[in-house]
Image (spheres, rainbow, N blue to C red):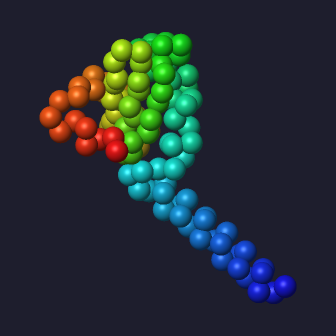
Amino acid sequence: MKKYKSTIFTVLITIFMMLLLSLFSPYNVLYELNENNLIQNDSFLQSEFDKEDVKEVEYIGDHTYIIEKEKTEYIARKDYTSVMNYQWTLYEYEKSWGAGEIRE
């Protein structure tokens, strides 16, 4: 019984440490979990995209998302100017030379 408690405790500490390290890394697990609510939670992205037009939102790391609409795809990047202030930068995703390296 004591062995199982120590094993469970070790697993929980390991998961907690991985989530904590994820908060400070370029690929944040919490952004992956909230990618579907990205457009409805941000006023700038709401004004740029209609919720009905968006087919898929994919988090690719470092505050960068690929937003797929019916005919085009966009790359949305959140650029921080200070700890609390940011602005979105939108690019149209073009399938040109080297562009396929973003998705795997």
Spot occupied by residue 40 in the image (x, y as percentages of width and height): 55, 22
Q: Is residue 65 above or below residue 91?
A: below
Task: Locate residue 62 relative to residue 96 in the image: left or right.
Answer: right
Spot occupied by residue 5 in the image (x, y as percentages of width and height): 78, 80
Q: Residue at x 23, y 26 (%)?
A: 94
Report the residue that reaches farthest toward the left: 97
Q: Residue at x 51, y 43 (%)?
A: 32
Task: Locate residue 7 relative to residue 19 in the image: left or right.
Answer: right
The image shows a total of numbered marks equal to: 0
Q: Is residue 44 visible?
A: no
Q: Residue at x 53, y 16 (%)?
A: 51
Q: Residue at x 44, y 56 (%)?
A: 24
**Quadrant holding the C terminus:** top left
Q: Is residue 81 visible?
A: yes
Task: Locate residue 39 relative to residue 9 in the image: left or right.
Answer: left
Spot occupied by residue 23 in the image (x, y as percentages of width and height): 49, 54
Name the one closer to the observer, 104 or 82: 104
Report the residue that reaches farthest toward the right: 1
Spot occupied by residue 73 in the image (x, y as percentages of width and height): 34, 23
**Quadrant holding the N terminus:** bottom right
Q: Quadrant of residue 49?
A: top left
Q: Is residue 83 above or below residue 94?
A: below
Report the residue that reaches farthest toward the bottom: 2
Q: Is residue 33 above or below residue 4?
A: above
Q: Quadrant of residue 85?
A: top left
